Amino acid sequence: MARHKVEICGVNTANIKVLTNEEMVVLFRQFQEGNQMAKEQLIQGNLKLVLSILKKFNHRVDNMDDLFQVGCIGLIKAIEHFDLSYDVKFSTYSVPMILGEIKRYLRDNNSVRIARSIKDIAYKALKKKEELTNLYGKEPPISKIAHELNLTEYEVSNALNSLKEAVSMFEPIYNDGGDTIYLEDQLEDKKGTTYSPEIKIALYDAIQKLKEKEKYVLTSRYFIGKTQMELANELQISQAQISRLEKSGIEQIKKIIM
């Protein structure tokens, strides 16, 4: 069966080798013993994993080469942090790190380019919306705009939403002089508090890299349930210092796993 050739960042995807689990184990052992060639083979052997993740973003940006390079950075970080003792497949461990790297790039760099076809629909919808508003004296529903343009409601709604500025989950929404409340604090978790094994592993790995005081504060606050005041009395420091240690630890974790 012929393999289709796809060029991305100068890489011919038809020629990418996919490693077996046995080959991965051998290469990881060699890399962890200092063999940099093994690391290069691990990168090359997992490029198709990056490409499979990029499919989720295929209709959101024009230049997939940029995202491919960012995804490769996430892949390299996953290879450098992976430990065979985790007893999970490398793909299970690496997907959240690759996704995190791509999402952080899209969030932090205003280089997201909405696909031209979606932009065209959005501008046509805005023009039609204005025409119908002037005609009937009130703003038309999405269904009416979609009917006039011979499109589905989803296509019109999605296009118009693409023009809206994204709001970060870490946007501060209230500060009374104490701890800042962020948007993420007000979002309901409809899926409960059960996290996937790969998330738990990544979080555990990140916590181990913190300074001892930051690690102690975070584990006491979020696993034991102590208040900042209780920790301040225990460690004989101010509540403000506890707050700074907590925020610093959280920021470090974000940098590691996002």
Image (cartoon, rainbow, N blue to C red):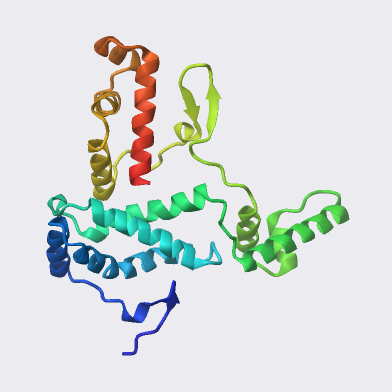
Q: Which corner quadrant of the image does residue 252 belong to? A: top left
Q: Nearer the viewer, residue 189 or 164?
A: 164
Q: Is residue 207 above or below residue 130?
A: above
Residue 89 placed where, x, y %?
Answer: 20, 59
Q: Is residue 27 above or below residue 175?
A: below
Q: Which corner quadrant of the image does residue 203 belong to? A: top left
Q: Which corner quadrant of the image does residue 215 belong to? A: top left
Residue 222 placed where, x, y %?
Answer: 29, 28
- Can residue 31 be seen here? yes
Residue pictured at 60% horizontal, 58% vertical: 158
Residue 256 placed where, x, y %?
Answer: 33, 44
Image quarter hosting the N terminus? bottom left
Residue pictured at 19% horizontal, 65% vertical: 38
Residue pictured at 16% horizontal, 65% vertical: 27
Which residue is situated farthest in the bottom direction here?
Answer: 1
Q: Nearer the viewer, residue 163 or 46?
A: 46
Q: Determine whether, in the image, residue 47 is placed left or right of residue 173.
A: left
Residue 26 placed where, x, y %?
Answer: 12, 65
Q: Exactly how many numbered labels are in the figure?
A: 0
- Can residue 152 be seen here? no
Q: Is residue 46 above or below residue 77?
A: below
